[in-house]
Image: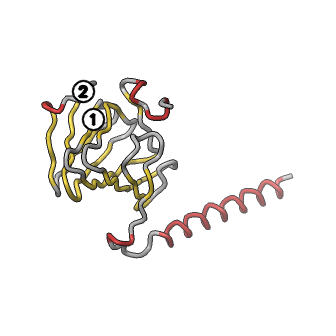
Amino acid sequence: MKTPRFAMLFVSLIAVQASLVARATEMAGPLQPNEIKWSPVPPVLPAGAQMAVLSGDPAGIGLVTLRLRMPPGYQIPPHWHPTDEHVTVISGTLALGMGDTLDRKHSKILRAGGYAVAPASMHHFAWTKTGGIVEVSLIGPFAITYVNAGDDPTHKK
């Protein structure tokens, strides 16, 4: 009886190792801006922006780095995450604020090079007048909870 269990454990370990090697191979080389593959944001974010995963798996456990390309006028209503979010503005602008309502007057506008940390569970919002690209690093899995359930794009028809 111990042999089948050992065999299953051995096969599982090899599968995990192969997965990690494949993942490391995917991320091994440097990446130029024109090589980034953009896709529409997932349904948990307001439509209109694009996202690129640079490393990690947003649905998995571990470090994730992604970029969000937002058009002018894009906004993310008040929400929170179960883990810290580290945000760096790559280009354009991003306004961030804390609280349960999107209040533009109580936002700080970050320009290219600007940086912010949204601690776990902190209610915050984001918007951009001009559009921009931000890089976000977090520990996955990625999750977002909107303060007002009606703001959750997955609940809209």
Q: Looking at the image, what colour scheme do you see?
A: secondary structure
Give the residue drawn at x 38%, y 55%. 66
Nearer the observer, 122 or 76: 76
Residue type for callout 2? Gly
Question: Circle 1 sits on which residue?
Answer: 125
**Vertical side of 39 occupied by 83: above or below:** above
**Vertical side of 112 occupied by 155: above or below:** above
Give the residue drawn at x 41%, y 36%. 144
Nearer the observer, 95 or 22: 95
Where does the image place residue 60, in percent across and percent down from the top left?
A: 52, 49
Q: Is residue 122 left or right of residue 108?
A: right
Nearer the observer, 28 or 78: 78
User: How many angstroms separate mark 2 from mark 1 (CA)?
Assistant: 7 Å
Secondary structure of the residue carrying numbered label 2 = loop
Dots 2 and 1: beta carbons under 8 Å?
yes
Q: Is residue 79 left or right of residue 43?
A: left
Nearer the observer, 157 or 80: 157
**Dot 2, crowdedness within 10 Å: few (<14), some or many (≥20)?**
some
Residue type for callout 1? Phe
Going by the picture, which residue comes out furthest to the bottom?
Answer: 29
Secondary structure of the residue carrying numbered label 1 = strand
Give the residue drawn at x 86%, y 52%. 1
Q: Quarter of the image holding residue 96?
A: top left
Where does the image place residue 26, in percent across and percent down from the top left?
A: 49, 70
Give the residue drawn at x 41%, y 54%. 64
Where does the image place residue 22, in percent across and percent down from the top left?
A: 56, 69
Question: Circle 2 sits on which residue?
Answer: 99
**Dot 1, crowdedness within 10 Å: few (<14), some or many (≥20)?**
many
Mark sitting earlier along the chain (2/1):
2
